Amino acid sequence: MPDTLQSTTDEELMLRYGGGDLPSFRELYRRHSQGLYRFVAWRSPRRAWVDEIVQDAWASLHAARASYQPQAAFRTWLYQLARNRLIDMLRQKEPLPLDIEVMADVPHEAATPQQTFEQKQQHALLHAAIALLPVEQKEALVLQQFCAMSVHEIAMVTGAEPETVKSRLRYAMQKLRAQLGASGAGGQT
């Protein structure tokens, strides 16, 4: 891949893709596919929805490529596409309990069988604790901790004020610490 693509901003890549440059799309996909999948997987109440929502977000990106104007960070815009699709699905379908194992498809680094077992146990405890959070707190926490978004970016994705996002994050962390401390997980977040 040319160095010029790797050093190009997401917004410039999207503008290039809007002009028909397929390598620019490939670079955007390389940069954001795992983070977007992770965000949707944490947010979706059903494993079966994750692939559909992610695919729909990329399809929406493709459909909007010619009219794209960088008014916010590209990643923020992409995550909003996925979030809006999830909200549409939640409105259309009967609410369902959360699939605790929904994150099982996210790739993990190579580890020994013992390490893998311990990681799965820790992951299950963390996922169960996060699942107990109110939706808004869970969403803010996932965007910050698993998608590396700033408070400002989270505010853009969720449509909330930055101070509201800060409060949601603070309460989410307090609840996680309490939950994980009570479960004997040592407060790992």
Image (tube, rainbow, N blue to C red):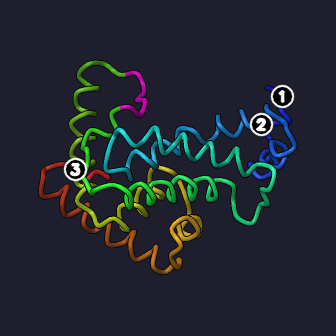
Mark 2, secondary structure of its residue: helix
Identify which residue, 97 or 137, lies in the foreground: 97
Residue 71 belongs to the span the image colors magenta = no
Q: Position of residue 100 (x, y in %)?
A: 24, 44
Residue 109 belongs to the span the image colors magenta = yes
Residue at the limit of the structure toward the top, as seen here: 113
Callout 2 environment at 10 Å: few (<14), some (14 to 19), or many (20+)? Answer: some
Name the residue located 79 percent from the left edge and 31 percent from the top edge. Answer: 23
The residue tagged 2 is 6
Q: CA distance from mark 3 to mark 2?
A: 37 Å
Q: Position of residue 124 (x, y in %)?
A: 23, 41
Look at the numbered discs 1 and 2 and tell me whether their residues touch, using CB distance below 8 Å: yes
Look at the numbered discs 3 and 2 and tell me whether their residues touch, using CB distance below 8 Å: no
Residue 128: assigned label: 3
Name the residue located 59 percent from the left edge and 68 percent from the top edge. Answer: 156
Dot 3 amino acid type: Ala
In the image, residue 134 sits, relative to residue 50, either above or below, namely below
Callout 1 environment at 10 Å: few (<14), some (14 to 19), or many (20+)? Answer: few
Q: Which residues are magenta?
A: 105-110
The residue tagged 1 is 2
